[in-house]
Amino acid sequence: MSVTLILLPIALAAAAAAGGVGVLGAAVTAKGGNDSGPAAEIRVRTRMKDSTLLAEALTNLGASAIDVSRTRVTAEIDGVSLTMTLTDDGVWEAHVEGRDGHEVTLASATELLQRLDGEYAAMVQRAVAEKIRARAESSGFDLVSETREADDTVTMVLNVRAQA
């Protein structure tokens, strides 16, 4: 079995959730079978946008055979092939297909994409925190403190310097 996941940008997912799409902005719809066997489609909200960061997140999750272009990312991870394609509407579609006898289910495909989304989010947070650290002083701020919570949430306290 193969599974296709439609990864909705967070803003679109919020609108869909308001329309009753459900938990995690996911809506499952059956698709007709094809030559490769039955297929299913699921919609999952995501913050993923950048194909380069997607590739780095996949690397951090242990993926191999990663190939990246602006609109397509492919990789092998956890016994499956993952192909992510950016549609003309700016929405990522992720197709997960089992390899070497590995079964793909909606649950396993969704879990894989949630792990990828989580790693992607952590990378974005690290990049933003680094930019804040690098630009604080030249922007008139002093970094007073920085703490990291158990869930990797970073809290920074900045003081605005008094103008002389």
Image (cartoon, helix red, strand yellow):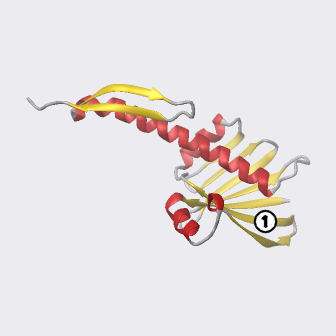
Label 1 CA crowd tier, 10 Å (few <14, some 14–19, many 20+) = some
Residue 163 relative to residue 8: left or right: left
x then y, percent, for residue 151: 57, 34
Q: Quadrant of the C terminus?
A: top left
Q: Is residue 90 visible?
A: no
Q: Residue at the spot x=46%, y=33% of the render?
A: 154
Left or right for 103, reference 141? right
* Number of numbered tags placed on the structure image: 1
Residue that badge 1 annotates: 40
* Left or right relative to 66: residue 138: left
Where is the N terminus found, in terms of image quarters? bottom right
- Quadrant location of residue 146? top left
**Does residue 41 appear to the left or right of 8 in the view shown?**
right
Residue at screen point 68% across, 37% down:
61
- Provide residue 156's location: percent of width, then percent of height: 38, 32
Residue at the left extreme of this rendering: 164
Q: Is residue 102 above or below residue 154?
A: below
The answer to whether residue 24 is seen in the rendering is yes
User: Closest to the observer: 96 or 8?
Assistant: 8
Q: Secondary structure at mark 1?
A: strand
Please provide percent x and percent y for residue 106: 78, 57
Residue 149 at x, y = what percent?
52, 30
Name the foreground residue: 3 vs 27.
Answer: 27
Q: Amino acid at mark 1?
A: Ala
**Residue drawn at the location 78% of the way across and 72% of the way down:** 31
Which residue corresponds to the image point at 78% horizontal and 65% vertical from the top-left? 40
